[in-house]
Image (spheres, helix red, strand yellow):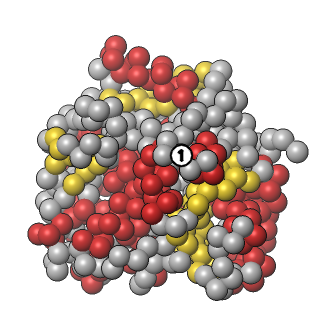
Amino acid sequence: MNASRRTGPSLPPSPGAVHLECSSTGRTSPSERLAGLSEAGRPLLVRYDLDALKGRFTPASLAGRPPTLWRYAEVLPVRDPLRRITLGEGFTPLIDSPRLARSMGVRRLWIKDEGQNPTGSFKDRGLCIAVSRAWELGAKELAIPSAGNAASASAAYGAAAGLPVHVVLPRDVPAPILAEIGALGASVQLLDGVISDCGKVVRRNCDEHGWWDLSTLKEPYRVEGKKTMGYELFEQMGRLPDAVVYPTGGGTGLIGMWKAFAEMEQLGWIGPERPKMFAVQAEGCAPMVRAWEEGEEEARAWTDPATYASGLRVPGAVGDFLILRALRESEGGAVAVSDQDMARWVEAIGAATGVFAAPEGGATAAAVPKLRDMGLLGGGEEVLLFNTGSGLKYVGMEPEGT
Ligand SMILES: *Cc1c(COP(=O)(O)O)cnc(C)c1O
């Protein structure tokens, strides 16, 4: 693997995980073999010996490291430097957007442009780590249900590792994504349905053929890749923003950043303060918003999900309780926006900043005036929006509803 040879040796070794921990019961299990959900059927989280890293793994120690997410090697699970697959993922630009800030009535606003990842979305972060780690632990073939971007990312990292990838997608996946997956050599199955229907087919195929299931939060390592967004915000800003606005489907990024903040506190990088975390969903598929408004600890599945923001067309999430907990503990919240608003804000972001955002990125901007009206966001606050993908991946898709 040329790429890993290029990046690997310039980084310190990874001590790796000490164990996995059930996110619900806290029960620990071994980290050095392939693991899906916990015995309780809940997501597993990766734990490291952070006390041993304290004072050695510091923001200053990152200087001069490669501009990819592997710069946080000490808090990533992959031990063998030759299994660190890289296509240049992570360390995306943080774009200061004063005109957008003024038009929204907030003091300062940045866009974290995840559209600049190798396959054009932040799914690359999670799947870079999940595929590298599955490869390290001996997986031979990979499978994933996806609304689109996760399939592109799996196909890319599978190809880089030399592992076959099987993806199952809804039939109405955006055409550019389908073309990309085809070129990356994955085998594709299209279904009439949404991502949860695809997930059932993947599960069956994995049981039958011994493939490794990379579904959101059904293995512990995609969260580890996504958590690097939390480390990166701190490294790039030198602090954390007052509020993070995140387009939420399965919630891996939100859960990952929340985990990163806890790790950074244990490492002595930050204190107990946290940004307010806001989850944005589409009006046509808003299970987390409904659960948050009803004060629930878990979310009921949404029936007939409809939105052109394919990353948000996720009717139910295995990590629902972790998402809702992060929203509550951070004193943030959840809000739904219409497809029409997303599309309008994609244009507003483009004209004001030069970033061609995905509809999911448009959704985060559309959420800000609503959060201001709801009194959840003050005019004096510093806000960070996640543009989670490139608008180029959605060319030809039209907003749903009116
Ligand atoms: C998958 C996806 C999301 C949702 O991400 P989660 O971490 O699963 O909540 C948002 N935007 C885009 C572009 C996506 O591909």
Quarter of the rendering containing residue 356:
bottom right
Q: Residue at x 41, y 17 (%)?
A: 204
Label count reads 1
Percent of width and height locating residue 56? 16, 77
Report if residue 98 is visible in the image: yes
Q: Is residue 401 left or right of residue 19?
A: right
Q: Is residue 105 left or right of residue 72?
A: right
Identify the residue at the far right of this view: 402
Report if residue 161 is visible in the image: no
Percent of width and height locating residue 44? 29, 43
Quarter of the rendering containing residue 139:
top left
Q: Residue at x 25, y 62 (%)?
A: 75
Q: Residue at x 29, y 32 (%)?
A: 40
In the rendered view, would you say 368 is above or below 96? above
Identify the residue at the far left of this view: 52
Secondary structure type for disc 1: loop
Crowding at label 1, few (<14), some or many (≥20) Cα neighbours within 10 Å? some
Quadrant for the C terminus in the image: top right
Percent of width and height locating residue 206? 36, 21
Q: Residue at x 14, y 69 (%)?
A: 51
Identify the residue at the far front of this view: 295
Q: Is residue 248 left or right of residue 217?
A: right
In the rendered view, would you say 210 is above or below 28? above
Residue nearest the observer in this picture, 153 or 94: 94
Percent of width and height locating residue 347? 79, 63
The residue type indicated by label 1 comes to Glu
Q: Is residue 297 left or right of residue 53?
A: right
Residue under label 1, please give it.
Answer: 296
Tell me if the residue at label 1 has its CB under 8 Å from ligand 1: no
